[in-house]
Amino acid sequence: MGDEIHQMQHPLGLKRLGYAGLTLTQPALRWTDGATAASEETVAEEVPVALVYNGAPHAVMMASPADLEDFAVGFSLTEELVPTAGDILGIEVQRYSLGIELQLQVTAAVAEAIAGKSRSLTGRTGCGICGSSTLEGTIKTLHPVPAGGQFAPEALHRALGALAARQDLNQLAGTVHAAGLARPDGTLDLVREDVGRHNALDKLIGAMARRGSTQVGDGFLVVTSRASFEMVQKATVVGAPLLAAISGPTGLAVRVAEQAGVTLVGFTRGGRHTIYTHPARLAPNA
């Protein structure tokens, strides 16, 4: 599963190119209080990332070119393309001048099932479901989260407060989202970043799976974005009892969280938060 660059030709004739940079330096003009000055700005990169299963293309997502093996595993799990991480037999990262291919080897039965689910469009940076050709492919089967577990409100703010310090790429360039796995007391266990909020969560879930666990357990998830419904869906796949977002939820996200048994919290910032579903887990004296 090494992130290797192989010096050979792409089947379509595209020249291979090592892609090491997560950011670029861009000349710009900065306006401040009526004065304009030349500046050098650090800009976060986004590239097309194609996910290919047993040689068959499935989807192209726009993503940050980091933690790509985590992304491959997390995307495969949250899109329910593979039943378990163990069904992924190998991952090879191939970098080209126009983008990156994640070539996954899966079992024959899984490959056959994936063949009927390929997306027809590129997944844009801000879109977690772009290219799904049917409504059934968009609204997936709910994964009910068991009742139980409580968290202190301070734990949510501790986790989101600490998340910024763990965002190395965002500190360089801004514009980058993060997803974090927090322990019950709010200390952060894992963090992943990406220009796409859903990609960041997929990378986090992939990192969890690659270290041996596909369940959140007694912790919770935090994200530096709005809580759209696909974020809630992905959280249910790993049994997250609580998802806390720095921004607000959508109506569909609230309905999905309510039905799945997830405590959905929005606007978790500045010493405040709003609980939209299953408030019993967030007891003031937990």
Image (tube, helix red, strand yellow):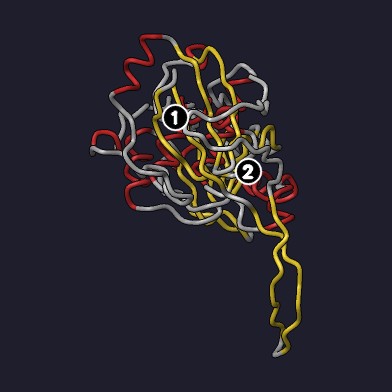
Name the residue beneath numbered marker 1.
78
Q: Is residue 261 above or below residue 54?
A: below
Q: Is residue 15 above or below residue 7?
A: below
Q: Residue at x 36, y 9 (%)?
A: 109
Q: Position of residue 161 (x, y in %)?
A: 69, 51
Residue type, label 1 = Thr
Residue nearer the viewer, 42 or 204: 42
Q: Residue at x 73, y 44 (%)?
A: 166
The residue most toward the top is 108
Tell me the crowding category of disc 2: few under 14, some 14 to 19, or many 20 or more residues within 10 angstroms, Cα based.
many
In terms of sequence position, does the residue under pointer 1 or pointer 2 come before the other?
1
**In the structure shown, which secondary structural element does the residue marked by tag 1 occupy?**
helix
As measured in the structure, the alpha-carbon distance from the residue carrying label 1 to the one carrying label 2 is: 17 Å
Residue nearer the viewer, 130 or 14: 14
Q: Residue at x 45, y 41 (%)?
A: 231
Q: Position of residue 119 (x, y in %)?
A: 33, 36
Residue nearer the viewer, 95 or 286: 95
Quarter of the image where the C terminus is located: top right
The residue most toward the bottom is 34
**In the structure shown, which secondary structural element does the residue marked by tag 2 occupy?**
strand
Residue type, label 2 = Glu
Q: Residue at x 44, y 18 (%)?
A: 54
Q: Position of residue 249 (x, y in %)?
A: 42, 52
Quarter of the image where the N terminus is located: top right
Name the residue beneath numbered marker 2.
193
Tell me the crowding category of disc 1: few under 14, some 14 to 19, or many 20 or more residues within 10 angstroms, Cα based.
many
Q: Position of residue 56 (x, y in %)?
A: 40, 24
- In the drawing, what numbered circle is on residue 102? none
Callout count:
2
Q: Are marks 1 and 2 in contact (CB under 8 Å)?
A: no
